[in-house]
Structures are given as C-alpha cells and as structure tokens.
Image (cartoon, rainbow, N blue to C red):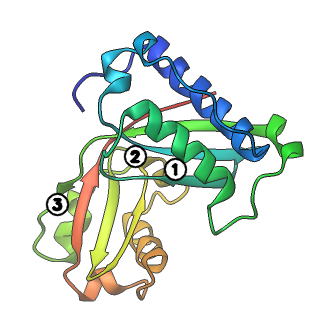
Amino acid sequence: MSAQLSAEEKQTLLYLAREALEYGVRAKNLPGVDENRLTPLLRAPGASFVTLTIHKQLRGCIGTLQPYQALFEDVREHAIAAALQDYRFPPVRADELARIQVEVSRLTLPQVLEYTDHDNLLARLRPTMDGVILRDGSRRATFLPQVWEQIPDKAEFLSHLCAKMGASPDAWRHKHLEVQIYQVEEFHE
C-alpha cells in the first residue's frame, strides 16, 4: 500500500460510505462529490470492501480485489452494494440504518503466494495479517484478514474458503490451488 490514510481521510471515507448507504437504501440519487476537496490519495485508484454489521453480526459485505476507479468512488459503490446486493442477505431496510455499523477495508494489490504443498501453504499464511484469495479455474473466493478473528485455525480457514468458492472443503489439501494474499487498512465507525 503506497501511503497510509490519515485520520481525516478515513473519516471522509466513512462519511461517504454512510451517505451512500443511506441514499441507496432510501432509493435516492447519490449527491455529487466535490473532488477538489478530496486528497490525492482519495482520488487515486483504490480497491476496497465495505462491511456492514448489526451488533457485530454480518449484514453485508461487498468489494473488489483490484482497483478500477477512484478510492472514494469505490467505497461509495460498495457501501450501496453491501446494503442491497449481497446475495447472502435480504436488502437492508431503512429501519435498520441506525443500527448498522460501517467498516471500510482498503486493500493492497494481491500478490501470488508460492507454495510447494499443503503443509508449506499453512506455514506461509499469516493469520490476522493476510487476506487470502483462492482460485480454482473460474471459481474464486476471498476472506479479508478480519475473518481470521472468527476462524483462527489455518486449516479451518482454508476449508471454509474452499467451501465459499464452491469446492470441496479439503480441496486445498489435495489440489494445487492458485493462492494470493493481500493486506488491508481497516477502519470503522
């Protein structure tokens, strides 16, 4: 990650995510942003995930692994998508908005993690530090580094990630999957 976000930049992104969430759930047009008031880092291409929780329970999480637009736009887009398009949950209702906590994760570019076998893969993973992407052909899934808090065991983490990808939970033990890792700068309301 090039430079860390300042406290003010983090607050700006959280404000923009909250605003997008509120407007999106209420089906209102999102207001424009005066980009001249944003720092160069917020205007630069960036990849993010926006996670919504209610009482620490997941309510929606959507993002991207590769930057394709300005970071501030990415956060706004994914705040709305996390509320309305996460297939695991019904769309967020207006009466839930006051209880929702917004978390933003800014991602580094994914890097290939070379490994020789499943034991070596386990040894190379860094719980709480690395987000992990598994790929098997056209199937792909990721867990943000924060998921290590719920699944601290490396083998269990990979098994859950395989299942999320639609593969057998033990696929990582029997097949050489493409593995990438990334780190995040995470902050929340």
Which label number is shown at residue 164? none
Q: CA distance from mark 3 to mark 2?
A: 16 Å
Of labels 1 and 2, earlier in sequence is 2
Q: Residues within 10 Å of mark 1 (few under 14, many from 20)?
A: few
Q: Is 61 on the left or on the right of 8, as rendered?
A: right
Tell me the quarter of the image containing the N terminus: top left
Q: Quadrant of residue 74?
A: top left
Residue 188 position within the rendered picture, expressed as x and y whole percent measured from the top left: 58, 30
> Is the Cβ of the residue at disc 1 closer than 8 Å to that at disc 2?
yes
Q: Secondary structure at mark 1?
A: helix
Where is residue 168 drawn, in percent x and y? 42, 88
Real-space Cα distance between discs 3 and 1?
21 Å
Q: Which mark is residue 128?
A: 2
Q: Which residue is mark 1?
A: 149
How many neighbours does mark 2 have within 10 angstroms: few (below 14), some (14-19), or many (20 or more)?
some
Identified at 11% across, 64% down, the residue is 114
Mark 3 against mark 2, which lies toward the viewer?
A: 3
At horizontal 68% and vertical 56% (from top left) the residue drawn is: 84
Q: Amino acid at mark 1?
A: Glu
The residue closer to the viewer here, 124 or 93, is 93
Task: From the image, tell me which residue sits under label 3.
Answer: 113
Above or below for 170 versus 107 = below
To which quarter of the image does residue 174 belong? bottom left
Mark 3 is on which residue type? Answer: Leu
Please tell me whether residue 28 is drawn above or below residue 136 in the rendered image. Answer: above
Instruction: Say left or right for 74 vs 40.
Output: right
Instruction: Indicate the quadrant containing the C terminus: top left, top right, bottom left or bottom right.
Output: top right
For the residues labelled 1 and 2, the Cα–Cα distance comes to 7 Å
Tag nearer the camera, 3 or 1: 3
Query: At 30% from the left edge and 28% from the top edge, which residue is drawn?
Result: 44
